[in-house]
C-alpha cells in the first residue's frame, strides 16, 4: 500500500485532496509553536506525592484560585485543613464549599474559621484563640495564599482600621498572624516538619525600595502590590531568623522553615479581576480573547504545583539547609533583589510594622470601648424610656380605672335616686 502511494506521489504529483507542501509546513509550525508555548507556560508539575494523614494545615485564601486547589490537593492527601476565610463560617456559600470539598476529597477534616485579613482585630481574635490552647494545638503547615490585587485604574482604598488595603491584606496581615502564632510555632515538638509557605510574585522585582514611602500621589495598584510582596519577602526572611534564634528547651535546632513560592502567571479569579479591570466590558473582551489567557497563563491547578511541592517535598523540609528560600517551578531559585537580605531594611520594616499595629490596635480598642459605652448608654436610655412608658401606661390605666369607677358610682347614685323617686311615686 505505501509503495504504490509513494510511486504515485513521485510520478503523478500530489493527489488533489492533499494540501500544498508549504501549507503543511505552515500548519505544522503553527501547531508546534502553540503546543510548545502551552507546554512552556503550563509550568512544572509537583513530583512529590505524600500521605498527609494526621497533619494540620492552616491556609488563608483557600477558597479561590491557587489557594483553593492547594487546600483541595492537601485534603485529598489526608491533611486536616483549617480554612481561614473572609466570610463567617456559617455563610451558606462557605458551608456548601466546605461540604463539597469534604465529599470530593473523602476527607471530613475540613473546617473554616473566619479571619478577615483586612482587620488586625479579626486576626488577633483568631490567633489568640489558637495559641490559648493548652497543650498547644498541632500545626504542620501554614500557607498564606490570601491576597488582594486592585484592578488597574481603581482608586486607593483603606481598611475600616485606616490602613491601605493592599499593604494590609498582602503584608501586614501575615506579619500580624505569624507574630501572634509564634509561640505556637516554636512550641511544636522537635520531630515535627513545620513549613510556613509564603506565596509571592515576581512583581516584587519592580517594587520601589521599602524605605521610600508610597504616599497617596505615588500610589498605583501595581506599585502597591509589588511593594507589599517585597515587604512580605523581606519579612519572611527575617521571620526565619527570628525562629532560628529561639533556644528550644530541648536544645534541638528549630524545626520550622519559611518557604517562599512564586506560582507564576495563573488564571485565577483575582488575576481575571485584574486583567478585566473589574468591569463588564473587560470581562467581555476577556471572554472573546480567552484563548490568549489559556495559552499564556497556567490553570489554577498548575499554579498550585510549586506550593504543593513546598508543602510536600522532602528536599525542602527541616535539616535541608537554611530556610527562607524561594521556589519557582518546583525548584529552588535565587531571589532577584539584594535588599531582601539587607538587615537594616528588614529591621526598619519590622519596627515600622510593629508600631503601626500597636498604634492602630490602641486606636481601634479605644473606638470599640467608646462604641461599647455608647451602646450601653443607648440600651440604658431605651430601657429607661421603656420603664417611663410602662409607668405612664400604668398611670393611664389607673386613671382610666378610677374614671370608670367614678362613672360607675355616678351611675349607681343616679340609679339609686331613680329607684328612690320610683319608690316614692309607687307609695303615692
Ligand atoms: N494569580 C497569579 O497569577 C499569581 C501570580 C503570582 C503570585 N500569586 C499569589 O498567589 C496567591 C494566590 O493568588 P490567587 O490569584 O489564587 O488569588 P485570588 O484568586 O485573588 O484569591 C485570593 C484569596 O484571598 C482571599 N482574601 C482576599 N481578601 C481577604 C480578606 N480581607 N480576608 C480574608 N481572605 C481574603 C480571598 O477570599 P474571598 O474570595 O472570600 O475574598 C481569596 O480566597 C496570592 O498570594 C497571590 O499574590 C498569584
Image (tube, rainbow, N blue to C red):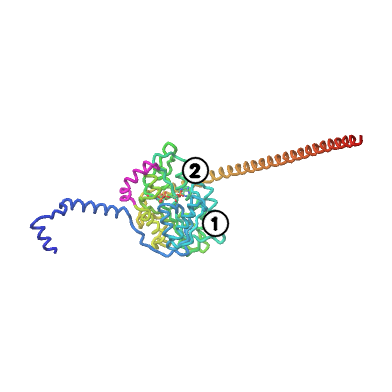
**Residue at 56% over, 44% down:** 364
Question: Mark 2 vs ligand 1: CB under 8 Å?
Answer: no
Q: Position of residue 262 (x, y in %)?
A: 38, 52
Against 139, is 232 above or below?
A: above
Q: Residues within 10 Å of mark 2 (few under 14, many from 20)?
A: some
User: Which residue carries the number 2 mark?
Assistant: 159
Q: Is residue 253 visible?
A: no
- Compare residues 77 and 183 and report the one nearer the observer: 77
Ligand 1 contact, mark 1 (Cβ < 8 Å): no
Q: Is residue 281 magenta?
A: yes
Q: Residues within 10 Å of mark 1 (few under 14, many from 20)?
A: some
Which contiguous range is marked in magenta?
Answer: 276-297
Question: How far apart are the alpha carbons under marks 2 and 1?
Answer: 26 Å
The N terminus, quarter of image: bottom left
How far across and down, in percent of the image, does residue 247 sit? Answer: 50, 59
Left or right side of 372 for 316 = left
Residue 388 pos. (x, y %): 71, 39
Q: Give the overall secondary structure of the magenta segment.
A: helix
- What residue appears at the point 37 percent right and 57 percent down from the top-left corner? 305
Residue under numbered circle 1: 131
| Secondary structure of residue under mark 2 | loop
* In the image, farthest residue toward the left: 11
The reply to whether the magenta stretch includes residue 40 is no
Q: Residue furthest right?
A: 428
Q: Earlier in the sequence, mark 2 or mark 1?
A: 1
Q: Residue 42 at what x, y percent from top left? A: 32, 54
Circle 2 or circle 1, nearest the eye: 2
Amino acid at each position: 500500500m505505501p509503495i504504490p502511494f509513494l510511486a504515485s506521489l513521485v510520478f503523478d504529483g500530489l493527489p488533489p485532496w492533499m494540501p500544498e507542501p508549504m501549507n503543511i509546513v505552515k500548519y505544522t509550525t503553527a501547531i508546534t509553536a502553540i503546543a510548545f508555548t502551552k507546554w512552556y507556560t503550563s509550568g512544572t508539575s509537583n513530583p512529590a506525592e505524600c500521605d498527609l494523614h494526621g497533619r494540620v494545615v492552616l491556609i488563608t485564601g483557600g477558597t479561590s484560585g491557587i489557594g483553593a486547589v492547594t487546600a483541595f490537593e492537601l485534603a485529598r492527601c489526608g491533611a486536616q485543613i483549617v480554612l481561614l476565610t473572609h466570610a463567617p463560617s456559617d455563610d451558606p456559600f462557605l458551608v456548601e464549599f466546605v461540604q463539597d470539598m469534604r465529599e470530593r476529597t473523602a476527607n471530613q477534616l475540613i473546617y473554616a474559621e473566619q479571619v478577615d485579613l483586612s482587620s488586625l482585630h479579626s486576626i488577633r481574635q483568631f490567633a489568640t484563640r489558637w495559641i490559648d490552647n493548652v497543650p498547644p494545638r498541632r500545626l504542620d503547615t501554614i500557607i498564606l495564599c490570601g491576597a488582594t490585587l486592585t484592578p488597574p485604574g481603581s482608586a486607593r482604598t483603606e481598611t475600616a482600621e485606616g490602613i491601605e488595603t493592599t499593604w494590609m491584606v498582602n503584608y501586614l496581615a501575615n506579619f500580624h498572624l505569624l507574630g501572634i502564632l509564634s509561640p505556637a510555632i516554636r512550641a511544636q515538638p522537635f520531630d515535627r516538619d513545620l513549613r510556613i509557605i509564603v506565596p509571592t510574585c515576581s512583581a516584587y522585582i519592580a517594587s520601589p525600595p521599602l524605605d521610600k514611602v508610597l504616599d497617596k500621589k505615588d500610589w498605583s495598584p501595581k506599585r502597591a502590590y509589588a511593594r507589599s510582596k517585597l515587604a512580605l519577602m523581606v519579612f519572611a526572611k527575617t521571620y526565619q531568623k527570628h525562629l532560628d534564634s529561639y533556644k528550644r528547651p530541648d536544645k534541638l535546632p528549630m524545626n520550622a522553615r519559611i518557604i517562599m513560592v512564586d506560582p507564576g502567571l495563573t488564571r485565577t479569579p483575582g488575576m481575571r479581576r485584574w486583567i478585566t479591570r473589574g468591569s463588564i466590558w473587560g470581562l467581555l473582551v476577556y471572554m472573546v480573547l480567552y484563548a490568549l489567557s489559556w495559552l499564556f497563563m497556567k490553570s489554577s491547578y498548575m499554579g498550585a504545583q510549586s506550593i504543593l511541592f513546598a508543602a510536600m517535598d522532602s528536599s525542602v523540609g527541616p535539616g535541608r539547609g537554611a530556610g527562607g528560600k524561594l521556589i519557582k517551578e518546583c525548584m529552588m531559585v535565587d531571589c532577584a533583589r539584594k535588599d531582601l537580605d539587607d538587615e537594616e531594611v528588614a529591621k526598619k520594616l519590622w519596627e515600622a510594622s510593629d508600631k503601626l499595629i500597636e498604634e492602630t490596635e490602641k486606636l481601634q480598642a479605644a473606638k470599640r470601648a467608646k462604641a461599647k459605652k455608647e451602646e450601653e448608654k443607648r440600651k440604658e436610655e431605651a430601657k429607661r424610656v421603656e420603664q417611663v412608658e410602662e409607668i405612664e401606661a400604668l398611670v393611664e390605666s389607673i386613671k382610666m380605672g378610677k374614671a370608670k369607677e367614678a362613672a360607675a358610682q355616678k351611675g349607681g347614685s343616679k340609679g339609686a335616686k331613680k329607684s328612690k323617686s320610683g319608690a316614692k311615686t309607687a307609695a303615692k
